[in-house]
Amino acid sequence: MADKEFLLGNRARELLRYTNQVTKIVTDDISVRDVREIIKKIAALDDIRDVK
């Protein structure tokens, strides 16, 4: 039983590290124009999975 708890703890720690890395703010200097362009590009896609 201890092995399963250990494995679960390791996976939870890996998930936390991944989540913190992915959601980390890269910079505070984001222009409104850049965000507007990104949103327009996303809105123009038929399927968001088409992004390469």
Image: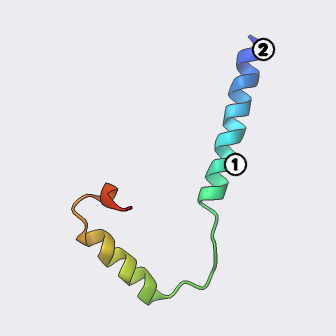
User: Taking 48 as reference, is 36 above or below it?
Assistant: below
Amino acid type, label 1: Arg
Q: Position of residue 48 (x, y in %)?
A: 31, 59
Q: Residue at x 64, y 64 (%)?
A: 24
Mark 2 secondary-structure assignment: helix
Residue, disc 2: 2
Q: Residue furthest top?
A: 1
Residue 33 falls in image quadrant: bottom left
Residue 11 falls in image quadrant: top right
Residue, disc 1: 17
Q: Residue at x 54, y 83 (%)?
A: 30
Residue 3 falls in image quadrant: top right
Residue in front for this viewpoint, 51 or 29: 51
Q: Position of residue 28 (x, y in %)?
A: 63, 81
Residue in front for this viewpoint, 32 or 44: 44
Q: Which mark is residue 43?
A: none
Mark 1 secondary-structure assignment: helix
* Image quadrant in which the N terminus is located: top right
Mark found first going from the N terminus, 1 or 2: 2
Q: Few, some or many C-alpha atoms within 10 Å of disc 2 (few <14, some 14-19, many ≥20)?
A: few
* Image quadrant in which the C terminus is located: bottom left
Q: Few, some or many C-alpha atoms within 10 Å of disc 1 (few <14, some 14-19, many ≥20)?
A: few
Q: Position of residue 13 (x, y in %)?
A: 72, 39
Amino acid type, label 2: Ala
Distance in Å between CA atoms under marks 1 and 2: 23 Å
